[in-house]
Image (cartoon, coloured by chain):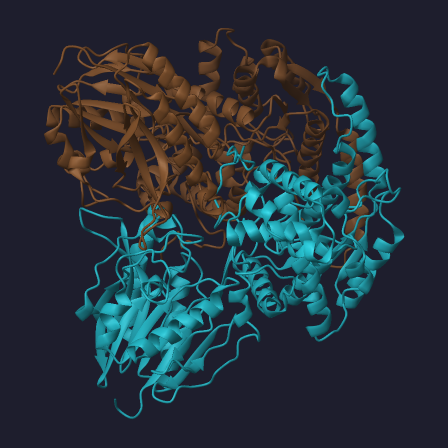
Chain colours: A brown, B cyan
Amino acid sequence: MENKFLVSLAQLNPIPADVEYNKNKAIDCIKKAIKNKSNLVIFPEMFLIGYPMGDILERYPILTEQCENALNEIKKYCKNIAVLIGYVEKNNDKFGKPYYNSACFIKDGKIERNIRKTLLANYSEHNDYRYFESAQVDTDNRIIELNGIKFGIIICEDAWNDFEFFERNLYKTDPVSLIAPKVNVLLCSASSCSRAKKEQLKHNMMSYCAKKYKVKYIYVNQVGANDELVYDGASRMYSENGELMAMAKHFQEDILTFDIKNGGKINPLPKGLELTLNSQKKFSLDYEPDLERTYKAITLAIKEYFSKNGFKRAVLGLSGGLDSSVCAVLLADALGKENVLGVSMPSRFTSSDSKNDASELAKNLGINFIEVPIKDAHVLFSEKFEDIFNNISWCERYEKSYTQDNIQARTRATILWGISNEYPKTLPIATSDKSESYMGYATVNGDMSGGYAPICDVTKTKLFALARWLNKNREEKNAIPENIIQKPPGAELAINPETGKTLTAEEALMPYEFLDEVIWRIENKHQSFNDMLSETFLYEKKNSLSKEQKTIWLEKFFKRMKSAMYKWYIIPPGPVVDSYSINKIEYKQSIVSNINYKEN
Amino acid sequence: MENKFLVSLAQLNPIPADVEYNKNKAIDCIKKAIKNKSNLVIFPEMFLIGYPMGDILERYPILTEQCENALNEIKKYCKNIAVLIGYVEKNNDKFGKPYYNSACFIKDGKIERNIRKTLLANYSEHNDYRYFESAQVDTDNRIIELNGIKFGIIICEDAWNDFEFFERNLYKTDPVSLIAPKVNVLLCSASSCSRAKKEQLKHNMMSYCAKKYKVKYIYVNQVGANDELVYDGASRMYSENGELMAMAKHFQEDILTFDIKNGGKINPLPKGLELTLNSQKKFSLDYEPDLERTYKAITLAIKEYFSKNGFKRAVLGLSGGLDSSVCAVLLADALGKENVLGVSMPSRFTSSDSKNDASELAKNLGINFIEVPIKDAHVLFSEKFEDIFNNISWCERYEKSYTQDNIQARTRATILWGISNEYPKTLPIATSDKSESYMGYATVNGDMSGGYAPICDVTKTKLFALARWLNKNREEKNAIPENIIQKPPGAELAINPETGKTLTAEEALMPYEFLDEVIWRIENKHQSFNDMLSETFLYEKKNSLSKEQKTIWLEKFFKRMKSAMYKWYIIPPGPVVDSYSINKIEYKQSIVSNINYKEN
C-alpha cells in the first residue's frame, strides 16, 4: 500500500426522484474533493435517485434516463479523481425485475465499472425485491485497484449475511466472503435507516468482518429523512483489527476526508448505544441510551419533512399534557421557535392547571401561543346532535357513547387545520403517541389528525423519559413544566364517575408500564397471549398483580388493538425510531384480519 | 383416463389470520364434497391463513403453529377423498425467508405431499418475497396420480411466466413448462385479485397454456374481499383445446363440482370483458365493459369490510352531487337500504336543487335520510377564526384562503363521525373519487374522511358512466335523479367571482375528460409531461385546445399532484378496481419525492 491515499465519504442528503438536485449535489461534492486532493469519493447507495424512491420508477420511466444522463454529466467532472456513486439502472434483458440497484465507478472522466447489488432487502421498511433484479456476485468486476490498493465493492444489504456472525441468514450467498479475501479495503455504499437496535449491531458486524478478513472496512451511508425514514449517516472506516478509524457526523450531512492508512476524525455517537442492542432482549424502562438518538432522529425528520415539502411552520394544540408538550419542544428545535404556534383550546373539562401548564411551556420555549376556548362550539354541536339523534330512526344506540368527548377533539382539529389553511407553508401536527395508537385511544379527525406525527413511534413510558431528558439536556433547561411530567396522562374529555375527576388514560386503559411492555413483547419477542400470561412482567415485580387482573388487561389489549387497526391505516406520516413500529412503511396488517389470541 | 372423476373447486372466502374460522370452513366443505362423491377438493392458495395475511405472521408466530394443527385436524376428515389446501409453512432451515407459501396434499387421512411455491409475486399489491422462500421446482413432487390421472400442481404466480405468451418475463424459471408436459391436468391454486385488465389476460393465458401443453387446466381462486383487495373467484377449467369447460360464480362463494372429463356448469362473466384488456392500450370514455365488474367488486368490498370488522351500518353526507349519490347506491345494495343513513348538510352555498336532489335520491333508494343545516356552525367557526387570525402574529397570510370553504367540509365530517360514535356498528363513508385524489381536491378531515372509501379508485368520467349504468341495470330503475348526473360537479363550498355561481370542479381544475386521460396515461402508459404534450388526447379530438392551454393544464396537474401526495397517504381503505391505483396497498411513493416533470 502506498503512503497516502485520500478518500472522501460523501455523506449527503438526496431528494427522492429529484435527479437534477442530487446530481448537482454530487458535482459540488466532487469539486470540493478535487480541491482537497482526494483520490476517491464514495457516495451512498442509489444516491442519484434517493432512497426510498418507491414505485415512482415504474410510473415515471423518464427517471432512469435522467440517471443515465446525470452519470454522463458527472463523469466530465471526474478528472484526476475516482468516484463511486449509486444510481438506478434499467434492466434491458427479457427476464427479471425491471431495474438494478447499481453503483457506477468513474475514473479519469470515464465510466469504468458498473456494480450491481446482489442481496436485496425486502423486510421491514425495505422493498428492494419489488424493483430490482439480483445480480450474481462477479468478483472480478467488484474489485478495483487504485494506487496499488485493492478495493472490493458491496452495496448495503450485500454486507449483512455473514454466516458466522448471524444466527440465521436470509440468503444463501455471502458476497463479502467472496470479495473480502481478495482485497485490502472493503467499500460499502449504503442507504440504511436509523433504528433503535441497529447502530450497535452494525458496529459489531462491520468490526467483526474487518477483523475476520483483515481488511479495512469503509461504510458510506445516506443521511437525512424522507417521510418516515431517518438516515443517520455516521459513515465510517474500520481498521484490519476491527478498530474504528474514522467516523462522520450522525444525523447531519458531512464530507469526511481522510488518509486511508491513518484514518481520520472520529465524530462520536451518543453514549450508551451498545445498550440498545441488548434492549431487544429484555424490557426495561431505562430508555436513557436511546434518547439522544431519538431526539436527533425526530428533529431531523421534522426538519426534512417540512423543508422537502415546502413547509415552514407548524401549528399544534397544547393541552398541557405530555404528548403535545414533547411535540412542541421537538418542533421548536427542528423549525425554530418563531415558526411554531401552540394553541390552547380549553373545553369545559380542561382544568386551569392544564391551561397554565400549556402557556408556561409556550413561554419557556418562546413559541407563539394563543388561547381559543371551544366551549361554544361544543355547546352548538351538542345541541345539534340532540336534534339529529331525535331524527334518526335506528333503535340501537350506545348507552354511553364517545360522541360528546370526540366533539371536543374534532373541534380542536378543525381549528388547527383552519389555521394551516390561512397561513402559507403551515402544517398542523398530530400529537398521538405509539401506546395510544396501539389502543386506538385517539380521535379520528381529532388528535390523530395532522400533516405530520412526530411521536407516533414513541411509547408513553419512553416519552416520559424523553421529557426529562429534554429538560436536562437542552440548552434552555426545564422547558417542560414539572407539573406536565408529574400529572397522570388523560385526554380531559370526560369525567370519571368513580373519581369525580377527569378520566385518566390509565383508568380507561391499563397502567402504561404494563401496556408498553405488552407492545414490547409483541414487537421484540413475538409473544402470544399465553406466553405473556405465563411470563413475569417488570410491572409485576414492582406491583402486586393478580392473574385475573393481568388476564383482563391482556384481553383488553388484544380487543382494543383489533379495533384500533383501522386507525393505524390513517396515522399521518411520522418518523420510525423504534426497533419495530406500526408505521405503514414497515408494518402491514389487514384491518379485517382476526387473530385467535386466546387459544382454547 | 378413467370414465368419471369428480373434482370440487372450493371457491371460498377466508378471514386473514383467523385459522380457526378458515379451518372450519374447509372441513364443512370437505364434508359436503364427500357427500357429493367428489374425488378431489381444491382450495385456494394460502386458504388456511387467508390472503393477504401481511406481517402478522412475523409478530404472531403462533399462526404457523395454528396452521399445522389445522392440517392435522383436517386430514381426519379426508377419508375417501383427496384434498389440496393452501397454508403457510415455517421455513426451519438456517437460510432463507422465514416461510414457504405451500399447498398440502392430503389423501386417505394422510398428508401425502407438500408443494412449495416457486415464483413469488412482489409487484403491485403482492408482497410474497417479503415472507416466502422460493422453492426450486421439484417436478416429481409436484405431480400426483389419482385414478390414473396425472395432476401437476402449481401455485398462483407459478402460472404467470410462459416464455412465449408474455413479451417480457419477471423470472427465469417457468414451472408450467417443467410440469405440464408430464401430466394430464394442470391444477392451479390461487388467491388472485380482481383488476380491470386481468380477467381477459388470465383467460387468454390459461387457455393458451392448456392448448400449448394439451392438458386440462383447473384454476381455483379465493373469493371475497379484504380491506382494499377484492378476490373475484371465477374458478374454472379449460379443456386440452383451451376451451372453457366449467366456471364457478364470480364475486360469490361457490363450490363447483363436476366430472373432470365432461366439465360442468359455466357461470358467465360480465359481457365485454375482453375489451378491458384492450382498454390498457388506448384511452376511452366507453367504460361499459368494466361497469358490471366494478359494481360487483365495490359492493362485495363494502359488504366484506363491514361484516369482517363487525360493522353493519353506514352514514354518509348526501350533497346532491355525483360522488355521494353513487356511494349511496352502492352502500344500499351492499348493506341493505335500512342500514344506510344519508345526511344532507346544506350550507349557505348549497342550492335548493342540490337539497332536493339529495332527498329524492334517498327516497328512491329507500335509505334513511335526515337534513342537518350547518350554517350556524359555519358562522360560529368563521367568527372564531376572525378572532384567531387577529391574535396570530405571523405576517404572511393568504390573500385568498380555503379556510372558509373547509370549515363546511369539516363540520360535515364532524357530524358524520359523531353519528357513528352514537350508534353501534356504524361507519362513516369517505366519498372522494380517484380524479379528486390525484388533484388533492378533497378536504382533509372533510369529505376525504371516513371509515371506508368505496369509490376512491374510480375516476370521475367513469363514475358518470357507472351512475348511468346503475340507473339502467338495477332492479329499481333511475334511482339517481337525472339532475345529479347532468349538473357539473363541484363542492359547493364557494362562489366563483367570474360566474357569480358556485365554483365548479372543472373551473377549479380542468375538464374531467382531460384530467382522467392524464391519469390514464400516467398509470397505463407511464408517459412524461413531454410525451403527453406531444400526443393527441381524446379531448383534443372533440374540442379545440391550444398548446398553451394544454401546457397550463398539464403543469397544473403535476403541481397539484405533488402537493396532493400527503393526502394519498391518509385516504381511508377502499377497493382497488382499476388496472392501476394510488391505493396504499399497491402504490408506494415518498411524499417528499420530487419529479422534474418538465425537462429543460
Please tell me which residue lies in front, A255 or B367. Answer: A255
Decide if residue A245 is in sight here: yes
The residue lying furthest to the bottom in this view is: B3
- Drawn side of residue A422 relative to residue A151, left or right: right
**Residue A205 image position (x, y, % from top left):** 21, 28
Q: Quadrant of residue B136?
A: bottom left
Q: Quadrant of the N terminus of chain A?
A: top left
**Residue B521 image position (x, y, % from top left):** 56, 52
- Drawn side of residue A45 relative to residue B12, left or right: left
Please tell me which residue lies in front, B317 or B19. Answer: B317
**What residue is shown at x 23% (from left), y 19% (from top)?**
A237
Decide if residue A578 is in sight here: no
Count of numbered circles on the image = 0
- Drawn side of residue B138 relative to residue A310, left or right: left
Q: Quadrant of the C terminus of chain A?
A: bottom left
**Residue B268 image position (x, y, % from top left):** 52, 79
Please tell me which residue lies in front, A592 or B266. Answer: B266
Decide: is A554 above or below A348: below
Decide: is A449 above or below A286: below
**Residue A563 image position (x, y, % from top left):** 52, 48
